[in-house]
Amino acid sequence: ANEFNRMQAKRRSSIEFSLVFVVFFMIGVGQHKNASPQPNFHHNGDENNSNIALSFANTVLFFAAAWIMQWSWRFVFYERWIEEPHSTKFVDLCTVCNISVFIMVENN
């Protein structure tokens, strides 16, 4: 049971990578200017005229791109050729030990 709980807590994406990715593209590359009603990448005017809905959509777009990149890296390359997924390791452990596991969810 402890092994199963430890494997359940394994994250599928890295928060640190996602934050660095979003900050790099929003601030470093200057994509935060997409949140203005009329985006102009070479405009050096007022930076406070951004729309809050466009800013939210821009941020969500970059976080989604970071998640898709991490998922595709993990699914296509890492879990196939470098390391097995944790759920597969648990199934292999149960198979080697010759035990059956029946997991039920308890609602409080």
Image (spheres, helix red, strand yellow):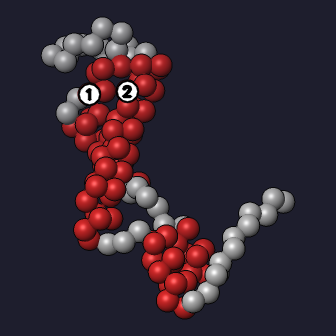
Q: Amino acid at mark 1?
A: Gln
Q: Nearer the viewer, residue 10 or 80?
A: 80
Q: Can you say whether 60 is above or below 39 in the image?
A: below
The residue under the point 52% across, 84% down is 95
Q: Secondary structure at mark 1?
A: helix
Q: Can you say whether 82 is above or below 72 in the image?
A: below
The residue under the point 36% across, 9% down is 37
| Image quadrant where residue 58 sits | top left
Residue 107 visible here: yes
The residue under the point 47% across, 19% down is 53
Please state, as top left, top right, bottom left or bottom right, where the C terminus lies in the image.
bottom right
Q: Can you say whether 97 is above or below 2 in the image?
A: below
Residue 91 lies, in percent from the top left, at 51, 76
Q: CA distance from mark 1 to mark 2?
A: 8 Å
Does 86 sit left or right of 16 as displayed? right
Does 88 sit left or right of 108 as displayed? left
Q: Nearer the viewer, residue 104 or 62?
A: 104
Q: Which label number is shown at residue 31?
A: 1
Q: Amino acid at mark 2?
A: Asn
Badges 1 and 2: C-beta atoms under 8 Å apart? yes
Question: Outermost residue, bottom direction?
Answer: 97
Q: Secondary structure at mark 2?
A: helix
Residue 66 lies, in percent from the top left, at 33, 44
Tell which circle, 1 or 2, labels the residue nearer the N-terminal end.
Answer: 1
Residue 105 lies, in percent from the top left, at 74, 63
Residue located beneath label 2 in the image:
58
Residue 48 visible here: no
Question: Outermost residue, left direction?
Answer: 42
Q: Which label number is shown at residue 78?
A: none
